[in-house]
Amino acid sequence: MTREDYERRMTRAGHAAADAGLAGVIVTPGPDLAWLCGYEQTTGERLTALVIAPGARPRMLVPALERGDIERAPGAGAVDLTGWTDGADPYAAMAELLAGDGRYGISDSAWAMHVLGFQRTLPGTSYAALTEALPMLRAVKDAHEVERLAAAGAAADAVYEEILKVPFSGRREREVAADLDRLLREHGHSQVDFTIVGSGPNGANPHHEAGDRVIEEGDMVVLDFGGLKDGYGSDTSRTVHVGEPTPEERKVHDIVREAQQAAFEAVRPGVACQEIDRVARKVINSAGYGEYFIHRTGHGIGVTTHEPPYMVEGEHLPLVPGMCFSIEPGIYLPGRFGVRIEDIVTCTETGGRRLNNTAHGMGIVS
Ligand code: ZN
Ligand code: ZN
Ligand code: ZN
């Protein structure tokens, strides 16, 4: 990513803001700032804010002590920096950078303390969450981004192939989770966001991470893992079984697999996000397990592992070529077991393309 790449993104953000009738976009540290100008820093109480107004050169308010770090960011050369020093009022300084009164899109993760500061200092301004105001800005990936996501997906796939070979029976969930963590890093991930190992009844809790339960022969085990590789996310789930599954375990797994496939086949430009959820849900409902599919079907992915748009009832946003998101239906039988199958998929002109390509059949582990 060069300075020009970041400059193009900032220009695009300015045009999108103008089209949406916004006075501009305010971006605070987090994934938006990393995406727009390559500046990755952990958020802090000192105000850092990039302001992109239509037709104007981007400007950034920066704490004086962080100025050197920001100047080294690849996109910083395309931004005019204004420093502020401890003891000064950053909100008064911010007022100088804004185009004036009006409505601004602001990073979803901006601290409430800062937004309240803007409102106090600039009572003529109002604010909208960036993903609501400009839902397509980060959601639609360019070809370069799709290939980064595909590379992260391929790395996660290699991890899955290797985890099938490690022993499950007799080991604790957290030991298998540690294997997943190590393998993700071996396959180029710089950050591991989650390594879910939900064995037996723990698999029925979609939020179960990994605990001290000892995995036994006969367990279904939900594996869901991902993180960031070269700045882009991976996220895949497969459900494996220790030894031979029962006919019921096979049946439930087959239903989830069919739901995942049907939702994948529904992907094409113009289809609303909620339709992807509906298609997956219809398969599970028809099989009689509707009450056990207790979460949305998917989420966007990009420079973070979970982001809008969501594949959920009520999300009318149409799929656009370049959008990348998960399709991850599941069935969770309380106290017994769970099944989830998840691939990252990108929408192309002609339909869906999977960025995870390991077999959907139930993996048998020992
Ligand atoms: Zn079993
Ligand atoms: Zn996942
Ligand atoms: Zn996911």
Image (tube, helix red, strand yellow):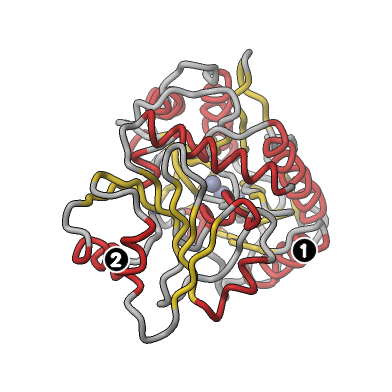
Indicate which label's residue lies in the foreground, 2 or 1.
2
Residue at 51% x, 55% y: name it: 203
Residue placed under numbered mark 1 in the picture: 185
Give x and y (percent) for residue 47.
41, 71
Q: Given the current orientation, which residue lies at the most extreme bottom position? A: 87
Residue at 58% x, 31% y: name it: 257
Residue placed under numbered mark 2 in the picture: 112
Around disc 2, counting alpha carbons within 10 Å, would you say few (fewer than 14), some (14 to 19), or many (20 or more)? few
Residue at 46% x, 37% y: name it: 55
Write down the quadrant of residue 118 in the picture.
bottom left
349 horizontally vs 255: left or right = right
| Mark 1 lies within 8 Å of ligand 2 (Cβ measured) | no
44 horizontally vs 237: left or right = left
| Label disc, if present, on residue 229 of the rendered structure | none
In the displayed structure, 62 sits above or below 122; it is: below
| Mark 2 lies within 8 Å of ligand 3 (Cβ measured) | no
Around disc 1, counting alpha carbons within 10 Å, would you say few (fewer than 14), some (14 to 19), or many (20 or more)? some
Secondary structure found at label 1 = helix
Foreground of the two, 25 or 202: 25
> Which quarter shows the C terminus?
bottom right
Q: What amino acid does circle 1 point to?
A: Arg
147 horizontally vs 267: left or right = right
Q: Is any part of residue 74 visible from this angle?
A: yes
Secondary structure found at label 2 = helix
Q: What amino acid does circle 2 point to?
A: Ala
Foreground of the two, 260 or 184: 184
281 horizontally vs 350: left or right = left
Give x and y (percent) for residue 53.
42, 44
Foreground of the two, 159 or 38: 38
